[in-house]
Amino acid sequence: MSPAAYMLIFILGVAVVVFTGFPAFLFKVLALGLMLGTLLVFLKKEFLLLSVALLLFLSGMLRGTLGPLPLPFLEPVSGRLETVRDSFVRHIAAILPEPQSSFIAGLLVGGKSLLPRDLKTALGRTGTSHIVALSGYNVTIIANYISLIFRSPVFSIVAILTFVLATGASSSVVRAGIMGSVFFLSERYGTFYKAKDALLFAVLLMVFVHPDIMAEDIGFQLSVLATMGLLYLTRVITPYLSFIPECFNLKKIAGETLAAEAATLPLVLFYFGFFSPFAPLVNLLILPLIPATMLFGFIAGLGAYAHNLFGIFLAWPAYLLTRWELGLIQFFANIHVF
């Protein structure tokens, strides 16, 4: 049995508890009783794999009854990093007008709460809210930049974890951060990186720390489903997009966007009751520009620490890019289909 299967069995055990709503006490008694029974046959070779699988499943059930795992040692660190983040957002706001400043802050540090209400509505109508919600896409871009700066995988992992804590450690960012760290670890030790196993490990780690996240955190559910869509559906959808050119990765972006949309559509309809028919097109027009927008926005923010005028001078590329991106979002948001 593969490590991925063991991880999945434990996760399923947790899921049984958090989704059924049965009293935790009954689950504890059931899990402990069955674990004792399983141990009696554990030494018999013919039942070894079955016993291990059952023990993992029951361990998952037991973990699901115990609630979140406290991590007090992270609070002082995350508090200091959030202070740095807030300072950076203020410097961005000092050199760029609205809504460009809030948009770039969302891209870089997830400042979605700062967005004007009409822009939030437009992002939702066009299926582009993930851009400013610090999804795995943003973390992937940042990880790519980090890998260019730090050749050492250890420094790259520290940089990613620092970014995760500084931005508030939302579920989608944590998931992407864990997967990115696994990638850099695989480089460090020369092992083959399997994105599917990395996703399972990320889910396992997050569920172990906070079991209720499976049922209570919509962001976690959407993030995992979107990643599964990227891993399993992209290769199915992309061959049908031969009419889209491959320049600027347009074909790849279109395939990944449609795959993520297809995977998350049932959950989006269940929670929000609508979907955006323009999401694939808008994402296709905007996503190729996001890495450059983030880079220029970050450089401008750093420049503002020296002087606002210097930051304004450096912000022109980011300003022009965001004018185009926000213009497209507002244009398609104003088209009422339903």
Image (tube, rainbow, N blue to C red):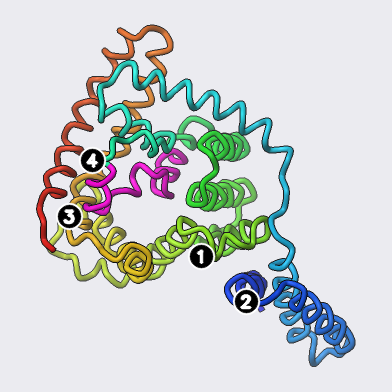
The image's mark for residue 281 is: 3
Q: Disc 3 and disc 4: Cα gap in Å?
A: 21 Å
- Is tag 1's residue or tag 3's residue first in the polypeptide sequence? 1
Q: Which residue is identified by label 1? A: 196
Which residue is located at x 54 percent, y 65 percent?
215
Q: Which residue is identified by label 2? A: 16
- Is tag 1's residue or tag 4's residue first in the polypeptide sequence? 4
The question of residue 310 being in magenta is answered with no
Q: Disc 2 and disc 1: Cα gap in Å?
A: 22 Å
- Local packing at callout 3 (Cα closer than 10 Å; few below 14, some 14-19, many 20+) is some
- Quadrant of the rendered image containing residue 33: bottom right
Position of residue 184 measured from the top left corner of the image (x, y, whole percent): 56, 46
Looking at the rendering, the stretch of residues picked out in magenta corresponds to 120-144
Q: Secondary structure at mark 1?
A: helix
Q: Amino acid at mark 2?
A: Val
Q: Amino acid at mark 3?
A: Leu
Q: Disc 2 and disc 4: Cα gap in Å?
A: 40 Å
Q: Disc 1 and disc 4: Cα gap in Å?
A: 37 Å
Q: Do residues under tags 2 and 1 come within 8 Å of each other at their CB atoms?
A: no
Looking at the rendered image, the quarter that the C terminus falls into is bottom left
Q: Which residue is identified by label 4? A: 118
